[in-house]
Amino acid sequence: MQLLLGETGFSIKEIEGGFIMVSGGTGVIGNPSIFYTVIDNNGAIQNLEQYGALDQGWFAGWGGSLDIKDEKTILCGSVDYNDSPSQFLAVSTDLNGDTLWTKILSSAEGLDEIGSCSIFTSDGGLLMCGSSYDFETHTKGLVIKTDSLGNEQWRSYHSSDDLAILYQSLSEVPGVGYYVGTTRSSSFDYLDMGVTFVDYNGVIGESFWVDNEYHDSAANVFATSDGNILQGGEFSINDGSAGHAFLRKLTPDGDVLWSNIYGPFGSQNFFSTIAETAEGDYVAAGSARSPDLDLSIEGLICKVSQEGDSLWYRHYVNISGDLCLFWDMEIADNGDITCIGATIGNAELQLSQDTWVVHLDEHGCLVPGCHVGIEEFEESDTYFSIGPVPAQDQFSIFMGRVPNKGLKVQIISPNGQSVDSFWAHTRPTTYIVDCSSYTAGIYTVVALSENGKVLQSERLIVQ
C-alpha cells in the first residue's frame, strides 16, 4: 500500500483497524497547521482533523513527535505568533484526532522554544523534549515533564558555553531513566550526535557522543526490549558531509555494544526512526541521496539483527518525487512495516509536497517476493518484477538487477505512447508508480540500456 496526502508526514501510530498520522504544512489562510489523519488498513481516510489559527503558525515536531497509550495521543511542537517568540506546544487527542486538551508550555523568560518529541512515561505522565533559543547565547536542549493532563512538573535545560545543544528524540528505560537523542554544533560547522541521560528528577546526566572527527546528524534513540539503547543517524567520513546510515547500541551506562554503518556512501544517508520486531530484530528507516542524481533522495529501510548485522537493505522511490524520505515507522505484530514521510515533486522549487505512507511486508516488499531470488536475477535475463497485476491506483516495479551504468524504465500505453519513465540505479530499489490517471487497458513496462536496447519487457494490466 502507498498513500499520498498533502503536506509532510511526521509521525504514525497503529490503532485498532488502521493508523493515526500527524502531518504538517499550510492550512488556515496560508498559516502552517497540524493535521491528524485516521486511515484504515487499506489506506482509506476515516477522519481528518486540522489544528491551527488565523494569526498563528502551528508546527508539529519531527519524526516520533506522536505517542499513543490507553486510546489517547500526545504530540508536541510549537506555535508562532507573528513577531512573538515561538512557544512550546503540547496537544492530546483521542484516537479520532479530536482534542482532549492543548497546553502552551511557555518559559518564564519568554524564550523561543519548540517541541521535537513526546512520550508517555511509565509513571502515567508525559515527557517532551525540544530546544530553547534566546539569540544571545547558544541554543539549549530542553526537556519538560508533565502529568497526564499536561500540567508541568519540572523542566531542565542542557547548555554549553561554546556549542548549541538540540534535543531531538526521547525514550525511557523503565526503572533507569530517560535517554534523549542529542545534537551539538558550532558556528564552525561542527556537528556531533549523542545520547544524553536524564534522571527521573530532571537532572541532566552524562552525554555519550559518537566518536567521529567529521560531523554527524539525525540523532534518534530507541529503548530496546533487552534494556539497552539504540541510536541512529548519519556517520560522516569526510569534510563534505558525506557518509553512511549509522546505528549503534549502548548499555544504559553508555558502553558501546556495537556500532555499524549500512548501505552505500553518499550525502544525507541517515536513519531517522527505529523500531523493534516481535522477534527482537531492529528496523531503521530514513533517507539516502542517490549517487547518480545530485538532487534525488530516496526512502531507506534496513533490517538488522540484535547484533547489528544487516539482514536486508532497500531503497524506495515514488517516481513523481525528486525527494522521498521517511520520518517515522510502525511495525505490526506480524512484522509488516508502515512508514510515513514525504515526497517532494521538484527538489529545487519544493513543489508537489505530499505525505507519503508506505505499507510493506516483513521483508520490506511492496511487490511480494522481492526478498527472494536476487541471485537468480543476477544469473538470468530478468531485471525487474512488477505487481500487483492487474493494477488499480498504483503498482510497484522492483529492480533486482541493474547494469553498472543503470537503465531506463518506460511505461508504454495501449496506443504506444510513453506515459511514465525513470532512470533506475545500480542497487535493488522499489519504484512506486501512481497509475490512477491511466486509462484501463494493457500497458507494457520496458527496461532499456543506455544505448536504447530493450533488455526486458513485461505486460501490465491496468483496471
Image: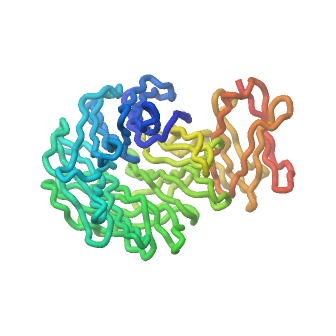
Which sits in the foreground, 428 or 246? Answer: 246
Q: Is residue 210 above or below residue 148?
A: below
Corner quadrant of residue 29: top left
Q: Is residue 391 above or below residue 311?
A: above
Apparent side of residue 409 relative to residue 301 in the rendered image (left or right): right
Evaluate whether residue 81 shows in this view: yes
Q: Residue at x 46, y 35 (%)?
A: 30
What is the x, y in percent for residue 292? Answer: 67, 60
Apparent side of residue 94 relative to residue 34 in the rendered image (left or right): left
Which quadrant, please, contains the N terminus? Answer: top right
Colour mapping? rainbow
Count the marks: how many?
0
Evaluate whether residue 124 shows in this view: no
What is the x, y in percent for residue 410? Answer: 78, 42
What is the x, y in percent for residue 339? Answer: 48, 42
Apparent side of residue 347 relative to residue 325 in the rendered image (left or right): right
Q: Residue at x 86, y 56 (%)?
A: 451
Which quadrant, please, contains the C terminus? Answer: top right
What is the x, y in percent for residue 50? Answer: 39, 29
Q: Is residue 37 above or below residue 166?
A: above
Which sits in the foreground, 377 or 180? Answer: 180
Q: Residue at x 51, y 74 (%)?
A: 239
Q: Residue at x 48, y 25 (%)?
A: 45
